[in-house]
Image (cartoon, rainbow, N blue to C red):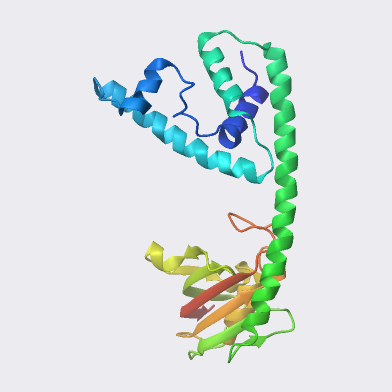
Amino acid sequence: MISFLLKRIMFLFLIFYIPSVFSETQLNPKMQSYSENKKVFKNENEKIGYALGVSLGNYVNQSFEKQKKLGIQLDKYSLLSGIEDAISNNLKLSNQEISEILEKLENRLKHATKIQIENNKKENLIQGQLYMKKFSDIQGSHKTQSGLMYIIDKPGSGEEIKENTEITVHYKGFFVNGVEFDNSYNRGKPVVFILKDVILGWQEGLKYIRKGGRIKLVIPPSLGYGNTGLNGIPGNSTLVFDIELIDAKNN
């Protein structure tokens, strides 16, 4: 029975290390005919099996590219040999050896990933600073003592926004490279929240407009999600938001 640790290691192995090699002629003769002759399938089951194989191949091909970026690349022929030996129950290593090797592999992967994350954080900080420097040259841009930058597209009108104000907004969120990471318009409805419950950049920035107003915020990591990041936002990310303040209610 495979231990929980081994299952976890094998799962990581599948995600990060299996290359897209299913078209190699090293596979068995039946598999070769699929590639060489553009197989005419005999029945629906063969089509299903092939479709699943293509889906898996596409997935692991993408994972293989990610693995290469970590500086770790395995021999694809040894990998295929291991798959064939497991299916035929003819292993060249003991289960204990396999478990130890995969545990070492997991530790290696964790170390490489940690290094990559730290390098990305440094790069994110540099790119954010460059973006903010360019943003400061745009007419109408402002920078506050906290480091927040903004441009007011429309000031709006009405009561002053406070920490306990209930806010209704539509917004788009971008990284400094222009990639969009969030968009309330796409979800089809605005977002409602209490101002004090959101990131510091929003807490400060939304106080510069009123109901009906629109503002662009450039938020440094210290006013966003910091060094660690959160939910798909990498550490040290400078974030750009286009925000439309639809409603504001002071309780």
Residue at 71%, 79% (x, y): give it: 147
Nearest to the observer: residue 87 or residue 175 = 87
Nearest to the observer: residue 7 or residue 108 = 108
Picture coordinates of residue 117, whole percent (x, y): 70, 51
The answer to whether residue 96 of the structure is visible from this angle is yes
Q: Quadrant of the C terminus?
A: bottom right
When asked about the image quadrant of residue 145, the answer is bottom right
Above or below, 40 against 214 in this view is above
**Apparent side of residue 84 relative to residue 145 in the rendered image (left or right):** left
Residue at 70%, 32% (x, y): give it: 106
Q: Quadrant of the N terminus?
A: top right
Picture coordinates of residue 192, whole percent (x, y): 48, 69
Picture coordinates of residue 54, whole percent (x, y): 40, 33
The answer to whether residue 209 of the structure is visible from this angle is no
Residue at 48%, 38% (x, y): give it: 59
Above or below, 216 against 84 in this view is below
